[in-house]
Amino acid sequence: MNAPLSSLVIDAITQFDIARAVKLLADLKKADIADVLEQMPPQASCQLLEHLPRRAKVFAKIDPDYQAKLVHEFSRASLAEIVSEMPSDKRTDLFKRLNPQEQEALLPALAQAQREDLRRLSTYQEETAGAIMTSQYVTLKQDMTVAEAMDTIRRQAPDAETIYESYIIDENRHLIGVVSLHELVLAPLHQQIQDLMSTDVISAYVDDDQDDVAKKIAHYDLLALPVIDHEGALLGIVTYDDAMDVASEEASEDFLKVGGVEASAPILNIKEAPLFLLYRKRVFWLVILVFGSLLSGLGISHFESVIEANIVLVFFLPLLVGSGGNAGSQSSTLMVRALATGDVVMKDWFKLLSRECLVALGLGITMAIAVAILGYIRGDAMVALVLILSMIGIVLIGSIIGMSLPFILDKLGLDPASASAPLVTSICDATGVIIYLFIAAQLLSNVNV
Amino acid sequence: MNAPLSSLVIDAITQFDIARAVKLLADLKKADIADVLEQMPPQASCQLLEHLPRRAKVFAKIDPDYQAKLVHEFSRASLAEIVSEMPSDKRTDLFKRLNPQEQEALLPALAQAQREDLRRLSTYQEETAGAIMTSQYVTLKQDMTVAEAMDTIRRQAPDAETIYESYIIDENRHLIGVVSLHELVLAPLHQQIQDLMSTDVISAYVDDDQDDVAKKIAHYDLLALPVIDHEGALLGIVTYDDAMDVASEEASEDFLKVGGVEASAPILNIKEAPLFLLYRKRVFWLVILVFGSLLSGLGISHFESVIEANIVLVFFLPLLVGSGGNAGSQSSTLMVRALATGDVVMKDWFKLLSRECLVALGLGITMAIAVAILGYIRGDAMVALVLILSMIGIVLIGSIIGMSLPFILDKLGLDPASASAPLVTSICDATGVIIYLFIAAQLLSNVNV
């Protein structure tokens, strides 16, 4: 829907009819205008933004990578106006994407307080609470009345990302309480904030992982989570909408990892990413997995004589080996997701192992019955027996590998999501080749050789 | 952390020391108490809930499957009190999990209005906006002043899931506007709501997919999304915290599907799910994939004579075939996630195809160089040539299959996430076997046979 609209808008701009272009966008929501702009060349977007109403708010909704492309295009006055009206966390995201010259050019456009805020926020390490928090929130004092608090909130509202939670700090900026606008609206006007506030505040440390921050917000159904330093001083807040973005980003990361795509930042967008980046993020695992496959090849060459004597074995090779890989990637996927959502923790491994063995045994027997019939038709009773024993063994071992690998990676301090389907498949393949040909060698060699 | 605490609590209950058990939980947040209770046997949880302060609120935080196990254990009076205090969407979730006798037993415990509300909410189809919305929200009239609106909000607050968004309806309950508490708090008390409200309301239809509802809430950074029928009458609202749960659930669903695990409701929890359910959700794909592997087997048996004449080919079989599967599952993973997040839509297919071909060509050439050396060492120059051509062809075709399959499934009205890594691997394996052995047959037969 947005692509045709963006070409209509581009047409209008090409004909120097900015008024028509602006009119086309007039009825859209800010987030939708941002989507349209992202489809357009940066020059065209900038021309439009110079004339759009609410342009600072629209600009804040644009993806920060695209924002960075627009910075050169603006007149100095427009840039100063737009950037100083951005929410502080979004401004920091943009600032971190600029090169040093661009950063130096931007700073004089800001007021003193904003400059200091920007310098402070951009020092926090990526993927921590500090890197995603905003410094725009409402603070109250504990000896205020509700009426005074409401006045303070009204005064601070234009510069606050939310007024639905207010934070009570002492003279050292230590966080001592939280009160919601819901509670304030229902309370008598003369009540003291210290009698109304909740002192048992859920908070995060500034160096906490962003994923833990997002999980905390979801777990406690918070609108915003205050971020403190290790002395307890309030540094910022993370709002629920940023937590939703983090959760989606982390899900993408795990998802790509499980598919065998390297998922360190920047997260790949298959439509926009430069081709060489796509190549680089995929080639690593593909080459690693070649060595996994070589193990299978070595297994095969070790049993070459058995294969030559019973060429029918090759027919069933992909089937048996593939089933182990498939069962294994099912197990690892279930396990990686359960570790990510927190449903499962390390100490559950042993309990889960026995459950997994039972399920895998059931799966192995079902599959064994299916292939035994095929084996009897194409081969003989001995071939059928080889297939039955191999299939049960392969599915069982494959499932155990699949469920254990994420735990082992976690124990080694690596991301369990690196137990990707391709990695598990490669390991299970090699194991499967050896199980299959070993059993065949034992049972068939004295018959056929 | 919660497991040891839950055993301390169980110890206290076993010694009939309910007071100590309650004290152990006293400082915890509602969501954390719910977590502890879920670790305990239903009888013990019920005994505790009978004595806990805020028990209705704690109960509402418990997983609905576990809630359903507790229903039998409560005294009738407690059940009536707890269930009538639950938020209406949570009450409906519980109700839908009870068997008809349990449902009949529960209804008389509720007030008339709650019974009707429950009957209405439980009629909406699973996974739609109707199934996740709540009927507890604040409504205003457009001719109220801000002062009157604030009084109405204070009155409706105890029964509303949020007071931060209020919905303005006309005499036919048609949704005509929305106003936030933020706007009300900043507005002069005598202003009319119709002059303050936003009339361009973002809403969802009651039969919209829950995934679209969650995406809308995230896209527009909403606190709550009103749900209307096709005549425009307001039926309920979905709050942001429920949208976060839906997003997490949908991510789990896609994640499991990509791993080749059937992911229709209930979403598997590998720790808690009954073993037979785990078996049933996995066996379907494993058996389907057997037929995929049979295609590879058929390919192999078609070229049996080439293999018998050049047994060295078998050594490289897992490597070549595996690389195609790996490249294919990388492509399908990138594509499935991009379709899920909305980064990519159907009409992008052609543009993406040409990008994918270039990336795959680069990957194929890199891999070909690596295996050519091995082929020359283990075989000869001709074998190396077979490997080079096969590897480039296999990685290219594998990537094209991987990126196209999710689109094809989407076009057929199926979930693109069903293009699981195991499925893509199986299809690419079969294609890879044929490409490899066909090229080998052309180049090697006149040399070695």
Image (spheres, coloured by chain):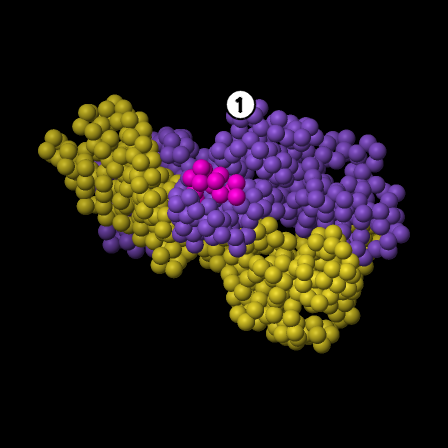
Chain colours: A yellow, B purple
Residue B336 is a magenta residue: no
Residue B178 locus on image (x, y percent): 78, 45
Q: How many marks?
A: 1
A194 with respect to A379 (left or right)? right
Question: Looking at the image, can residue A291 be seen?
Answer: yes
**Magenta stretch mostly in which secondary structure?**
helix
Q: What residue sits 56% from the left and 25% below the top? A: B105
Which amino acid type is shown beneath numbered disc 1? Gln
Q: Is residue A6 above or below residue B287?
A: below
> Which is more toward the observer, B224 or B146?
B146
> Which is more toward the observer, B447 or A49?
A49
Q: Is residue A156 above or below residue B339?
A: below
- Snapshot quadrant of residue A85: bottom right
Q: What residue sits 77% from the left and 34% below the top? A: B232
Residue B181 locus on image (x, y percent): 76, 51
- Snapshot quadrant of residue A159: bottom right
> Which is more toward the observer, B228 or A45?
B228
B177 with respect to A427 (left or right)? right
Quadrant where the C terminus of chain A is found in the figure? top left
What is the secondary structure assignment of the residue under circle 1? Answer: helix
- Mark 1 = which residue? B101
B383 with respect to B337 (left or right)? left
Q: What residue sits 56% from the left and 43% below the top? A: B55
Residue A141 locus on image (x, y percent): 70, 67
Q: Which portion, as a residue range, is magenta?
A: B39-51
Q: Is residue A202 above or below residue B196?
A: below
Quadrant where the N terminus of chain A is found in the figure? top right
A425 with respect to B211 (left or right)? left
> Which is more toward the observer, B74 or A176?
B74
To which chain does the residue with label 1 belong?
B
Residue B160 locus on image (x, y percent): 70, 43
